[in-house]
Amino acid sequence: QVQLVESGGGLVQPGGSLRLSCAASGSISSINAMGWYRQAPGKERELVARITSGDSTNYADSVKGRFTISRDNVENTVYLQMNSLKPEDTAVYYCNVRLLWGKTLLVDYWGKGTLVTVSS
């Protein structure tokens, strides 16, 4: 089994910053990618940022220039530094880890989510 433990969510004022962390443990095979998704009330889950095993990153257009994703390969941990937060960033943020089993099998694992609320 694979466990993902998220931390760092909370309430912050507009313009503020938060840092999310997600530590993966358990039967970790080869990590193909790690990332963060979010789901706001009444909306579908969307990709926020992702980082591959080769350290390639991609971001949602809405967070480019404000959010930064990084990872610690030794600790199997992914971080999301969120700056200049806006009320529209309010959502439950989910950690995602994609593992490669064998040569071709990719399996996604999800955290339980951490709530980020941006409000004055």
Image (spheres, helix red, strand yellow):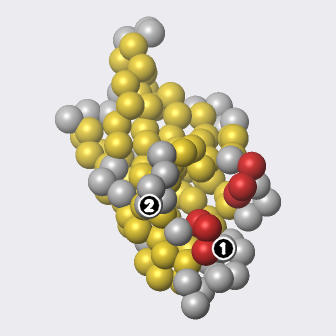
How packed is label 2: few (under 14 Cα within 10 Å), some, or many (20 or more)? few
Q: Where is residue 94 in the image (x, y as percent from the top left)?
A: 42, 52
- Residue 88 located left or right of residue 35: right
User: Camera-side residue: 71 or 116?
Assistant: 116
Callout 2 amino acid: Pro
Q: Is residue 76 above or below residue 81?
A: above
Tell me where residue 89 sits by quadrant.
bottom right
**Residue 93, can we see it?**
no
Task: Give the residue at x 58% y 90%.
Answer: 120
Q: Position of residue 98 (x, y in %)?
A: 44, 31
Question: In the image as oriented, which residue stretches furthest toward the top?
Answer: 103
Task: Give the residue at x 38% y 64%.
Answer: 114
Marker disc for residue 41: 2
User: Camera-side residue: 47 or 68?
Assistant: 47
Task: Give the residue at x 69% y 46%.
Answer: 59
Give the alpha-carbon distance from disc 2 to disc 1, as whole Å.
15 Å
User: Camera-side residue: 1 or 46?
Assistant: 46
Quarter of the image where the N terminus is located: top left
Task: Give the residue at x 69% y 41%.
Answer: 58
